[in-house]
Image (cartoon, rainbow, N blue to C red):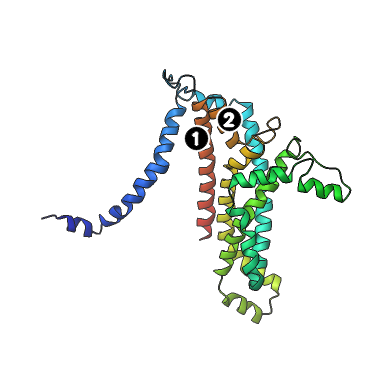
Amino acid sequence: MLTLKGIINGERTLPYLLLAPLLLLLFTVILFPFLWNFYISLFDLKTTNLLTGAPFTGLSNYLKLFHDPTFFHSLGVSVYFVIGSLLGQFGLGVILALILHYHPGPARFFRVVFIVPWILSALIIGYSWIWMYNYQGGMINSILRTVGLQPVHWLNNMRMALWALVIANIWRGTPFTMLFVEAGLKTIPSEPYEAARVDGATSWQSFWYITVPLLRPTLTINLILTTMWTFNLFDTILVMTRGGPANATLTTAMYMYKSAFEYGLLSYGAAIAIVMLAINALLAVLYFYTVGRQK
């Protein structure tokens, strides 16, 4: 006779029972919001017809989206923002990780100092950089005046506003790359380096032919995660520029927010969110393909 104990102890049933709480949580937190968001994107839901009901429009929001010049402009801004942030975060993060790894004594102090930007709230970071970019009394312009240079309208200049955001995002995101890469460096065994020294390899050769190949999966994962987070970044941009001036910093995430909550086009904002999710899924596929192939 089949008993509850027999079901729980069954080799086929037990894994599913153990996964059930996690699957329920994933459905509640991830799958249900996604399904609801996609459902909304198929209607013409606006703040003006929340109570009266929204007509079903099918894929019209997506068709409108791919004919929207502002949407493509926001994609272009996001590309520049992601590439600029990645170059800075990745480069500085790897350099700092190598320094802290090979100098463990000072690393105990500087690791705590360097991680502060990562643990701060995005709102605090945004308002802090607004103060530093201030034209009259900001720290950055004060330094420029001290060395004899002209101050810059960092957040009100269409040419400089995006790069001002990039600098702030690099400052915030570099600690994550630093810790991530440093953790990867600690997993590399010492035997390959000892064998390389016996064979007469230089420090540069050991780094290029041992450290880099063994660290490549870690670097790839960090690169993909940082790309996804930077593409989806919203709160810091909202605080610092709100997409301005003249849409110069209007990323796709910011355009989604404006469409849904400022313009009242809830279904259109939902469609933008679904397209952003598809872009993130492509990045995830890239991650699995790259790292999986290396394994």
For label 1, the residue is: 274
Q: Is residue 209 left or right of residue 277?
A: right
Of 160 and 287, which appears nearest the observer?
Answer: 160
Q: Is residue 64 left or right of residue 134?
A: left
Which image quarter holds the N terminus? bottom left
* Residue 244 spot, x, y in % from top left: 68, 33
The residue at 68%/62% (across/down) is 95
- Foreground tag (1 vs 2): 2
Q: Is residue 183 above or below residue 240?
A: below
Amino acid on which the number 2 mark rests in the picture: Lys
Marks 1 and 2, the one that precedes in the sequence: 2
The residue at 35%/48% (across/down) is 23
Quadrant housing residue 12: bottom left
Q: Is residue 84 visible?
A: no
For label 2, the residue is: 258
Q: Is residue 73 visible?
A: yes
Of 171 and 23, which appears nearest the observer?
Answer: 171
Q: Is residue 151 above or below residue 267?
A: below
The 10 Å Cα crowd at callout 2, few under 14, some 14 to 19, many 20 or more, is: some
From this viewpoint, which residue is outermost toward the right? 148
What count of labels does the image hold?
2
Q: Is residue 257 left or right of residue 18?
A: right
The 10 Å Cα crowd at callout 1, few under 14, some 14 to 19, many 20 or more, is: some
Amino acid on which the number 1 mark rests in the picture: Ile
